[in-house]
Image: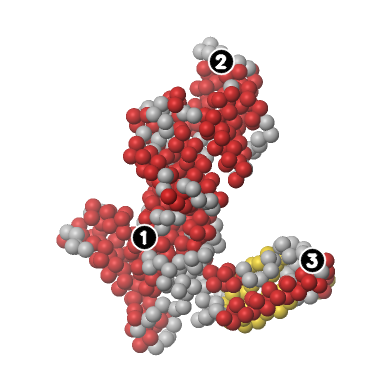
């Protein structure tokens, strides 16, 4: 199965800019450890994964009544601090949840990708 | 339904679901197929008598149905017919469970139903359905919701299991205790729904509480050394043992002190005491949830003393003090205040209630009213009884509160 893993909010991770260099290194190390853990796990593969630009760099495209508007920033009511994502192939949800314990303590949403045969 | 069928459904349902699921990993098909098999059995066994191996018979019929369905799905998908013919023999795809931890399909099934990614109220309903074979109709009645609501809830949970890839698996040994805690919490949720229904006319729903006890017992047999399950089973048995005495013949609430102790189930009380003395619960530091269940069970054990005069309320206060350190909750503070009132008088009880808040719950006001009445402050007590009556949704409890009011005002008041 494919899962989209969304790093939704900082959770217990302090804001990047407030962290010391050593702490930033630790966080980067955890991302590295996640890559390794996925590679070492049978049936698991990271298909894609990126860190995203800050919230203020996002652009919103909305169509209302056929009219398209392009505005600055994310939807306030939706994902405000989406920091990054992974697309992984994994045997089941428990494998994903177990691997995620390696990542820094972000608030994370795991959504299965709809499987169209 | 022939009695043999009734029995096998009651005793073997979870195991049959688990075995089929272990083989096919298709929750949707497995349950439908077993349902079909039971229907066929109802007709055939009534006519020809029950087979020698009722569970085996149902299993075989259900297995054929699943294979038929898989075959027609494959045909509909215009896949090669040979592939379909091979379905029955195909090994299951890779799962998280390496398979060498616990060879028990039933435990896998319980863990799947109570996966933390499912809403707890759906999880307990699903566990009653899949593990114990309780019908959706009965589960709806047990949880006091309309049948279509419950059917939708169970369907949603099953769909989530399939689409989110919640595995039919026993997690690694390191994660298992945590997962068994979820099992325990889910079962206790069902139990309390049966023990203290928030609405309706009946005071206790011993059937739901009984099913929840059965669920914990089933899992406890599989993991007898798990401290959380052991403590919870003891707690449930102690509370459940008083079921027949909590209500009188007219369906009226009977408070603990007035209960007919001859109607308690002493076998269950004894079993609970044995569980509480189990080596796994004594002398070792317990996981937090297990510790809270032990403390609550010890409180319940004080309440089943041979007569109410023997209840050591000072010990109860002490147990609640320990519980409040581990798991502070308004309900525990309320119960502690009741015990304080028994040891040190109603005024001390009222003081212990200060700062406790339970919005929307009638019990706080009911206890306060009771203590005020004992202090002789009838006016303030009646005021609090009014607050409690306004918040209480259970008819039997309301009747009890009204009876208490009338004893205060007297027959003429």
Rendering coords of residue B274 (x, y %): 38, 44
Q: Residue furthest top?
A: B412
What distance separates the C-alpha of mark 2 from that of mark 3?
63 Å
Q: Secondary structure at mark 1?
A: helix
Residue B276: name its quadrant: top left
Side of B389 relative to B131 (left or right) = right
Crowd rating for badge 2 (residues with CA inside 10 Å; few <14, some 14–19, many 20+): few
Disc 3 is placed on an element classified as: loop
Residue B101's x, y, as percent?
43, 69
Q: Give the residue at mark 1.
A: B14
Of badges 2 and 3, nearer the viewer stands: 3
- Decide: marks 2, 3 in contact (CB < 8 A)? no
Q: Is residue A40 visible?
A: yes
**What is the spatial separation of the Cα atoms under label 1 and label 3, in whole angstroms?**
48 Å
Q: Residues within 10 Å of mark 1 (few under 14, many from 20)?
A: many
Does B361 sit left or right of B272 as displayed?
Answer: right
Relative image position of residue B129 (x, y in whole percent): 41, 56
Quarter placement of the N terminus of chain B: bottom left
Q: Chain of mark 2?
A: B
**Left or right of A49, for residue B34:** left
Q: Nearer the viewer, residue B344 or A53?
A: B344
Q: Are marks 1 and 3 on the same chain?
A: no
User: Which residue is denoted by mark 2 in the rendering?
Assistant: B409
Image point (53%, 13%), residue name: B410
Instruction: Say which chain tag 3 marks.
Output: A
Mark pair 1, 2: CA separation = 54 Å
- The residue lying at 52 percent from left, 17 percent from top is B407
């Amino acid at each position: 199965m494919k899962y989209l893993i969304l790093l939704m909010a900082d959770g217990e991770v302090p804001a990047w800019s407030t962290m010391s260099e050593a702490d930033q290194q630790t966080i980067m190390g955890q991302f590295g450890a996640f890559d390794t853990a996925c590679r070492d796990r049978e049936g698991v593969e990271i298909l894609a994964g990126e860190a995203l630009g800050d919230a203020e760099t996002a652009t919103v495209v909305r169509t209302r009544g056929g009219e398209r508007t392009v505005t600055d920033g994310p939807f306030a009511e939706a994902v405000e601090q989406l920091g990054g994502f992974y697309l992984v192939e994994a045997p089941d949800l428990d494998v994903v949840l177990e691997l995620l314990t390696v990542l820094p303590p972000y608030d994370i949403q795991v959504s299965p990708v709809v499987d169209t045969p | 339904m022939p009695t043999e069928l009734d029995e096998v459904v009651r005793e073997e349902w979870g195991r049959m679901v688990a075995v089929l699921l272990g083989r096919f990993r298709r929750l949707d098909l497995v349950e439908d197929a077993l349902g079909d098999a039971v229907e066929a059995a109802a007709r055939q066994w009534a006519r020809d008598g029950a087979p020698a191996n009722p569970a085996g018979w149902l299993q075989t019929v259900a297995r054929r149905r699943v294979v038929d369905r898989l075959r027609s799905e494959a045909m509909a998908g215009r896949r090669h017919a040979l592939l379909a013919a091979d379905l029955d023999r195909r090994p299951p795809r890779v799962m998280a469970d390496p398979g060498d931890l616990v060879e028990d399909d039933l435990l896998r099934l319980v863990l799947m139903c109570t996966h933390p990614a499912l809403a707890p109220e759906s999880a307990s309903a699903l566990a009653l359905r899949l593990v114990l074979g309780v019908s959706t109709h009965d589960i709806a009645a047990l949880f006091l919701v309309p049948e279509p609501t419950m059917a939708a809830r169970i369907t949603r949970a099953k769909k989530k299991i399939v689409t989110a890839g919640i595995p039919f698996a026993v997690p690694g040994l390191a994660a298992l205790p945590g997962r068994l805690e979820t099992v325990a919490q889910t079962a206790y949720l069902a139990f309390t729904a049966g023990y203290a229904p928030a609405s309706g006319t009946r005071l206790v729903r011993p059937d739901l509480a009984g099913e929840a006890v059965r669920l914990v017992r089933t899992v406890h047999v599989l993991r007898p050394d798990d401290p959380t399950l052991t403590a919870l089973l003891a707690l449930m048995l102690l509370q459940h043992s008083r079921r027949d005495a909590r209500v009188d013949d007219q369906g009226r609430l009977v408070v603990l002190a007035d209960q007919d102790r001859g109607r308690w189930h002493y076998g269950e009380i004894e079993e609970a005491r044995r569980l509480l003395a189990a080596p796994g619960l004594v002398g070792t530091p317990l996981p937090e949830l297990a510790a809270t269940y032990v403390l609550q069970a010890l409180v319940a054990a004080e309440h089943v003393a041979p007569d109410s005069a023997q209840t050591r309320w000072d010990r109860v206060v002490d147990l609640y003090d320990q519980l409040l350190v581990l798991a502070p909750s308004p309900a525990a503070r309320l119960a502690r205040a009741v015990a304080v009132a028994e040891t040190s008088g109603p005024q001390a009880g009222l003081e212990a209630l200060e700062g406790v808040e339970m919005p929307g719950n009638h019990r706080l006001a009911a206890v306060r009213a009771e203590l005020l009445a004992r202090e002789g402050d009838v006016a303030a007590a009646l005021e609090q009884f009014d607050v409690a009556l306004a918040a209480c949704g259970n008819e039997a409890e309301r009747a009890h509160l009204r009876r208490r009011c009338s004893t205060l005002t007297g027959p003429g008041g």
